[in-house]
């Protein structure tokens, strides 16, 4: 298993803990919503050490659309298929 696969496995373990409400230490993972330089909404997923482990990759004109994207990840994230193209 390469470093990326190990990191990705740990990432999804943390996401699963977050989605089930299980504590991941002193705090849980958190989604941070912010406005970018174009005054549009984006999100970042922060680990308990406050480092960014994922981001939206796109901006949203309306905050509700940003929230929808976050909820898609929270609800469906554990069902995501891993598409490993390194083999």
Image: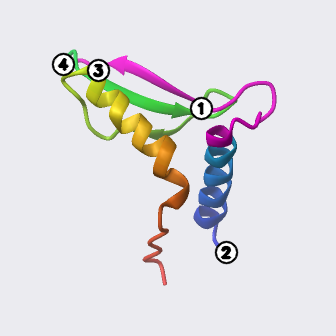
76 w.r.t. 63: above or below: below
Determine whether label 4 and label 3 are within 8 Å by CB. Answer: no
In primary-sequence order, the first of circles 4 and 3 is: 4
Q: Residue at x 80, y 25 (%)?
A: 26
Task: Give residue 51's mark.
Answer: 1
In primary-sequence order, the first of circles 4 and 2 is: 2
Q: Quadrant of residue 69?
A: top left
Which residue position holds label 2?
1
Tell me the distance, in whole angstroms, between the alpha carbons under discs 1 and 3. Answer: 23 Å
Which residue position holds label 4?
38
From the image, which quarter does the N terminus lie in?
Answer: bottom right
Which residue position holds label 3?
63
For this orientation, the residue located farthest to the bottom is: 87
Task: Please provide the residue range marked out in magenta.
Answer: 18-38
Q: In which quarter of the image is residue 27?
A: top right
In primary-sequence order, the first of circles 1 and 3 is: 1
Tell me the distance, in whole angstroms, between the alpha carbons under discs 4 and 3. Answer: 14 Å
Mark nearest the camera among 1 and 3 is 3
Mark nearest the camera among 3 and 2 is 3
Q: Residue at x 70, y 43 (%)?
A: 17
* Residue 28 x, y percent position in the rendering: 69, 30
Between 82 and 54, the residue placed more toward the observer is 82
Tell me the distance, in whole angstroms, between the alpha carbons under discs 3 and 2. Answer: 39 Å
Q: In which quarter of the image is residue 36?
A: top left
Mark nearest the camera among 4 and 3 is 3
Q: Is residue 34 magenta?
A: yes
* Residue 71 x, y percent position in the rendering: 43, 37
Label 1: how many Cα within 10 Å (few below 14, some 14–19, many 20+): few
Q: Is residue 32 magenta?
A: yes
Q: Residue at x 47, y 78 (%)?
A: 86
């Amino acid at each position: 298993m390469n470093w990326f696969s190990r990191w990705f496995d740990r990432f999804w373990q943390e996401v699963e803990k977050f989605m089930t409400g299980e504590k991941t230490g002193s705090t849980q993972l958190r989604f941070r919503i912010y406005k970018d330089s174009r005054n549009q909404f984006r999100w970042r997923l922060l680990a308990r050490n406050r480092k960014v482990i994922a981001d939206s990759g796109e901006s949203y004109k309306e905050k509700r659309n940003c929230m929808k994207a976050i909820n898609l990840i929270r609800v469906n994230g554990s069902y995501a298929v891993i598409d490993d193209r390194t083999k």
